[in-house]
Amino acid sequence: MTAQGVWRFGAVLFTLLGAFSAIVFARLRWTASDVDVVGFVWFVQNLPKLAALGCIIVFFSIALWCFIRSVMSFR
């Protein structure tokens, strides 16, 4: 397998991981807390949704980076 193939495989893999994270993010709901201590309770209750959002950003960023590397290794 060439370097371009490895980078393209990485781009596809991280795109799929990002899409899975987006599906999880869409299915989770935001929760509201009755008593809040400077946003800490809200943060703890919404941590899964925030983690899914972070995964979306990270996975799609890595996928874009892998895609750019695959195009640059073609030259």
Image (cartoon, rainbow, N blue to C red):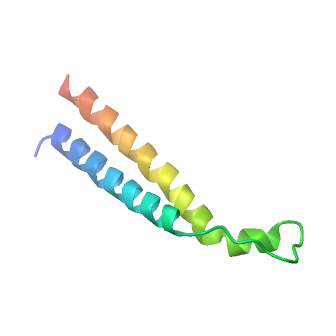
Query: 2 or 65: which is nearer to us?
Result: 65
Residue at the image position 59 percent from the left and 66 percent from the top:
49
Q: Quadrant of residue 51?
A: bottom right
Q: Is residue 15 left or right of residue 39?
A: left
Place of residue 75 in the rendered image (x, y in percent of width and height, measured from the top left): 20, 22
Q: Hey, which residue is sitting farthest top in the picture?
A: 75
Q: Quadrant of residue 30?
A: bottom right
Residue at the image position 19 percent from the left and 37 percent from the top:
4
Place of residue 38 in the rendered image (x, y in percent of width and height, measured from the top left): 89, 66
Q: Is residue 33 left or right of residue 8?
A: right
Q: Is residue 44 left or right of residue 75?
A: right
Q: Is residue 53 left or right of residue 33?
A: left
Residue at the image position 25 percent from the left and 43 percent from the top:
7
Q: Hey, which residue is sitting farthest left in the picture?
A: 1
Residue at the image position 22 percent from the left and 49 percent from the top:
9
Place of residue 26 in the rendered image (x, y in percent of width and height, measured from the top left): 50, 62
Q: Is 8 situated above or below 27?
A: above
Place of residue 41 in the rendered image (x, y in percent of width and height, measured from the top left): 79, 74
Query: 33 or 51: which is nearer to us?
Result: 33
Q: Is 51 situated above or below 58?
A: below
Q: Is 18 situated above or below 27?
A: above
Q: How many marks?
A: 0
